[in-house]
Amino acid sequence: MKLYTYYRSQAAFRVRIALNLKGIAREDTYLHLEKGDQFDPAYKALNPQMVVPTLVDGGATLFQSLAILEYLDETHPEPPLLPREPAARAWCRGFALINIADSHPLIVPRIRHYLLDEMQWSQEQLMAWIRRWIGAGLEAMEALLAAHEQSGRFCHGGAPTLADIGLVTQVTPARLFGGDLSLYPRVMRVYDTVMTIPAFADAAPARQPDAE
Ligand SMILES: N[C@@H](CCC(=O)N[C@@H](CS)C(=O)NCC(=O)O)C(=O)O
């Protein structure tokens, strides 16, 4: 499989974790999002949204990290990214979507550049925006973990799921942009557990060959 990625991309980080968990080898192509590699016409032809990740598997060109994670789970079922029981599956999906669908889209480079360049926000205003929306997601995750009897070392049950992947890519930008993570002890317990697993640790931004 061929992955178009950028070390700091949280969406690509999610896909790297899933590929590692499933033991799938990949060939990386690095796009530097701050240098505008995503706007190259050849890449736009591959991914009209001009975002990473894109995963190419044979003749299939896959986009949007959640769709890619589901594709990987369907084509490589072991280990599963979701529990078997429908309510538990929905809980894990919902938990991950706090990050994938709600928090992360508010802080991606094109939104940050729009706020800074077009709306003329200051760096301070931008940082307040990022911390506010990442914090709101973390607060919801913390409350969900507190109420979820099957959470412990992992978000749900005894193995990593989609929920843990979404938790990791919620915490990582919080760290990068200076959020107060001591407010979320359950979230951080899970984060600290999963980041000891090689599939997660090896997918981390700092471990990527294009890391700066
Ligand atoms: N919802 C998409 C988000 C993709 C996305 O926005 N990726 C970011 C990096 S995390 C990107 O490539 N941004 C380029 C830009 O904003 O110009 C997914 O989960 O795949």
Image (tube, rainbow, N blue to C red):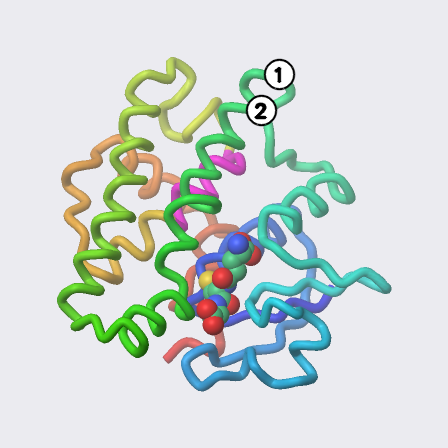
Query: Where is residue 170 drawn, in percent x and y?
Result: 36, 48
Say which residue appears at 39% left-offset and 41% top-offset.
167
Mark 1, residue position: 85
Q: Amino acid at mark 2?
A: Arg
Q: Residues within 10 Å of mark 2 (few under 14, many from 20)?
A: some
Quarter holding the C terminus is bottom left
Picture residue at 26% right of the left edge, 56% below the top: 130
Amino acid at pointer 1:
Glu
Which residue is nearer to you in this view: 208 or 104? 104
Figure label count: 2
* 40 relative to 209, above or below: below
Q: Nearer the viewer, residue 21 or 180?
A: 180
Kindly tell me whether mark 2's CB lies below 8 Å from ligand 1: no
Q: Main secondary structure of the magenta part?
A: helix
When asked about the image quadrant of residue 129, the answer is bottom left
Q: Is residue 127 left or right of residue 198?
A: left
Establish if 173 lies above or below 91. below
Residue depicted at 23% across the width and 61% down the height: 177
Is residue 125 highlighted in magenta? no
On the image, numbered disc 2 is attached to which residue? Answer: 89
Query: Looking at the image, is 102 positioned above or below residue 9?
Result: above
Q: Is mark 1 within 8 Å of ligand 1?
A: no
**Label 1: which secondary element:** loop
Label 1, residues with CA under 10 Å away: few <14, some 14-19, many ≥20? few
Task: Tell me residue 67's x, y (percent).
Answer: 65, 47
Q: Secondary structure at mark 2?
A: helix
Q: Which residues are magenta?
A: 160-169
Q: Say left or right for 109 vs 71.
A: left
* Residue at figure coordinates x 38%, y 13% from the top left: 149
77 relative position to 14: left or right = right
